[in-house]
Image (cartoon, rainbow, N blue to C red):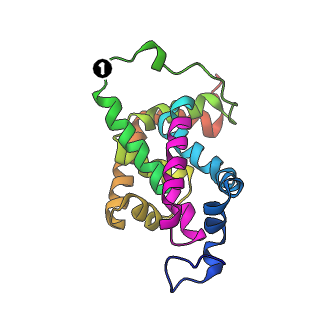
């Protein structure tokens, strides 16, 4: 006998992946595989730290497993994961602010990340974004890395759209003077006398 969805108004088609994942660990692994690039890249771009991004992704998947029955639909899954990862990143930032010393066993191991199209430019920009306050950083990453609409960012961060706009504008105003020297080399190539 098939279990009925928790919400009686919801069609059975909307919860196919979630219901399958509740019953079968392999189906849950499929959900992780389907969303792992988004989850990891969101966390990685927030901290620029591979180990921390992997830990946050693992925490997000654990929380997903605990909340599978509460999610409304398969379509809700991606939104829920983005929101959860973003919140975990903000929480981790707050924890790191209060931590003065780090034990050697807790220090992340050095790792190699594949080069981007212009690694120096990307590193420079990412280091400047990393200096922004956590809400500004979250808005910038969700807008430019995840390419989300302002309304979607507002839903994820539980902020009004106008607040998202203002936060993004202020973040970009803070970043412009810090990266202005990069624009000439990036757009026109190196200047030669």
Task: Using residue 34 as the reference point, say whether residue 81 is left or right of it.
Answer: left
Quadrant of res 44 = top right
**Would you say residue 115 sits in the magenta stretch?**
no
User: Where 46 sits versus 114, above or below?
Assistant: below
Secondary structure beneath label 1: loop
Q: Where residue 148 sits in the image (x, y, percent)?
A: 53, 60
Segment tinted magenta in the rendering: 53-81
Magenta span: chief secondary structure: helix
- Identify the residue under disc 1: 100
Q: Judge whether residue 150 can be spotted in this image.
A: yes
**Would you say residue 66 sits in the magenta stretch?**
yes
Q: Which residue is located at x 70 percent, y 55 percent?
A: 30
Q: Which of the two residues, 136 or 68, is positioned nearer the viewer here?
A: 68
Task: Using residue 80 as the reference point, say whether residue 117 is left or right of it.
Answer: right
Q: Which residue is located at x 64 percent, y 48 percent?
A: 36
Q: Where residue 40 sits in the image (x, y, percent)?
A: 59, 43
Q: Where residue 162 sits in the image (x, y, percent)?
A: 33, 65
């Amino acid at each position: 006998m098939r279990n009925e969805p928790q919400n009686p108004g919801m069609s059975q088609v909307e919860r196919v992946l979630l219901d399958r994942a509740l019953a079968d660990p392999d189906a849950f692994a499929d959900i992780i595989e389907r969303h792992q690039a988004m989850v990891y890249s969101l966390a990685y771009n927030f901290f620029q730290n591979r180990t921390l991004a992997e830990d946050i992704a693992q925490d997000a998947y654990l929380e997903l497993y605990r909340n599978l029955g509460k999610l409304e639909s398969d379509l809700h899954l991606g939104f829920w994961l983005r929101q959860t990862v973003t919140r975990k990143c903000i929480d981790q930032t707050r924890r790191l602010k209060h931590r003065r010393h780090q034990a050697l066993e807790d220090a992340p191991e050095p790792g190699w990340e594949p080069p981007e199209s212009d690694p120096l430019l990307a590193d420079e920009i990412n280091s400047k974004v990393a200096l922004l306050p956590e809400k500004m950083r979250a808005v910038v990453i969700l807008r430019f890395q995840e390419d989300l609409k302002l309304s979607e960012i507002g839903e994820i961060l539980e902020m009004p759209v106008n607040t998202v706009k203002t936060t993004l504008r202020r973040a970009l105003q803070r970043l412009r003077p810090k990266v202005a020297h990069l624009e000439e080399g990036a757009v026109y190539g190196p200047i030669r006398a």
